[in-house]
Image (spheres, coloured by chain):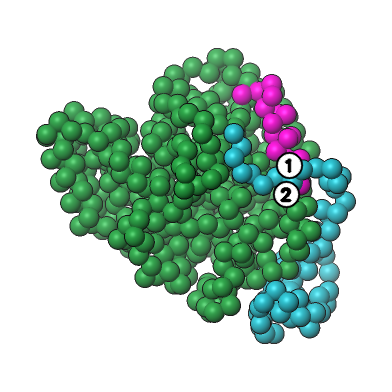
Amino acid sequence: MAELYWTSLADLARLIATKEASPVEVVKVHLDRIAAHDATLKSFITVCAEAALEAARQAEAELIAGRPRGPLHGVPIGLKDLYNTAGVRTTGGSKILADAVPAQDATVVARLKAAGAIVLGKLNMHEFAYGPEGLNAHYGHSRNPWDARATRIAGGSSSGSGVAVAAGLVPAALGSDTGGSIRIPASLCGITGLKPTYGRASRAGVLPLARSMDHVGPMARTAADCALLLGPMAGYDPADPTTSVLPVPDYRLALTGDIKGLRVGLLRRFFLEAGVPEVRQAVERAVKTLESLGAVVDEVELPSVNDVAVASFAIVGAEALAYHAQWLRTRAADYQPDVAQRLRMGAFVSGLQYVRGQQARALVRAEVDEALARRDVLLAPATPLAAPLLGENETTLGDGPSDVRSALIRLTRPFNFSGHPACAVPCGFTAAGLPIGMQLVGRPFDEATVLRAADAYQRATDWQARRPPLA
Amino acid sequence: MPQRARAGILPRMTTLDRDALAQWARLAGFEWGAAELEAIAGPLARALESLGRLEQLPLRDVEPLTQYRML
């Protein structure tokens, strides 16, 4: 039991259910990990040690009484600090909400607790989720655990979630994804992160960034663990009018390991072409692995994808400002500078441009639907580069120079735009030992196929089994 | 100067007039001083220039997406 902290969520749940491990022991092991490593990693904003131990003792009593709550009984998770938690501050990574204590849990938090999960704490993030680097001036920048010198970014905005899972401080966490905020830190930290279909999981009680682009989803070391978490999270919620009434399948049953005949569309133009050489090579190797498992791979293009960045600026800029306008008038000095700057730029988006952005979005969604009409999933790098250094502003991608922020978000944002489910999966390492991630994109509400493909790939590879030097 | 060479460095306000920006912000309800406007002028000029691309797209008959309730 010495390495319970590297045990998967699914195995922890099984060990607890069979009484081979106690929830108290599992929670203590992870609290010890946080105490040992988080001063360097800065992945937590709030650690709920006492509450987690109390919940673990309760879980143990329920188990002894033969009353397990559900498939997550007694397993600890972390929450990006924009999920409302009853009685526990929810800061959004900000100074403005530093002392904000919600009265109620967000819907998905309540559902995960009802399934037996125990909240270990609230995780660091880019302030108000408005940045793909994962930087935070108020609580410290989360450090990528794959860099022994702690000089590289984790990616964001769900930076703490990516770091804590990668470093074995929690077995799984929730993130949120408006332009890639689950998949970017998953890619840079070498873990698995699923952005479900828009409407699959409720955002009620989750601080918004841009409501028409916001998604919530799981982050874990494997696709199987993401499947385990998504089940209780998903489904209609009257408190979130965007959620779908479609039934929720048992995603665990989809993980057959069999992808014979799976039709995979490789996105080369704009996506693979953007990758630096090591990323391109890793994704090309992943294609060969998928083919060796029986998948049928061809290439496909999304012609309108070049317009995503500008249309996204119009949509996210306007929607983010709509939420922040009052604070921007009265507490502007309390924002970290890059976030204040992005929010201010939203004031210069016209109504005409916002609607044009939403129209361009319809074109992109139709193209993704068309690409998936005769394919089961699309494949692309999740990020075109591995983790940049803190403070690195410029980079060179496979198709030319770019600022780091645009580079990080470039390949993930199209699927926030379109709303399709997308899962980031580790697919290699650079020569410097930094993780490389790819993403699998599926049809709306077909997370099961995305997870089946990701899980089959992970059964055939061991990228997700490697451990970072800072852990 | 090529666009890429300027990236990451706050450019002088050559393409956007500070008074016009201040007026625009004021109409939106924000009283921003020179420092705030100087900080966003460079990236905003580039963003507004690229927003013009949206005008070139054949969007007249496209129903805007609002995402609500895909199914």
Q: Characterize the magenta stretch by its predominant secondary structure.
A: helix
Tell me the distance, in whole angstroms, between the alpha carbons under discs 2 and 1.
7 Å
Tell me which chain the residue with mark 2 is part of.
Answer: A
Q: Which amino acid does label 1 sit on?
A: Ala
Specify the colour of chain A.
Answer: green
B24 w.r.t. A198: above or below: below
- In percent of width and height, residue A216 lies at 49, 46
A99 w.r.t. B26: above or below: above
A295 w.r.t. A236: above or below: above
In the image, taking residue A471 as reference, residue A58 lies left or right, namely left
Residues at badges 2 and 1 in contact (C-beta under 8 Å)? yes
Q: Is residue A37 visible?
A: no
Which stretch did the figure color magenta?
A359-376
- In percent of width and height, residue A396 lies at 68, 53
Looking at the rendering, which quadrant does residue A18 occupy? top left
Q: Is A154 in front, or is A281?
A: A154
Which chain does cyan denote in the image? B
Q: Residue A362 carries which label?
A: 1
Looking at the rendering, which quadrant does residue B48 occupy? bottom right
Residue bearing the label numbered 2: A358
Q: Quarter of the image containing the N terminus of chain A?
A: top left
In the image, taking residue A280 as reference, residue A470 lies left or right, namely left
Is residue A360 magenta-colored?
Answer: yes
Looking at the rendering, which quadrant does residue A172 occupy? top left
Disc 2 with disc 1 on a shared chain: yes
Q: Which amino acid does label 2 sit on?
A: Gln
Q: Is B2 in front, or is A42?
A: A42
Tell me which chain the residue with mark 1 is part of.
Answer: A
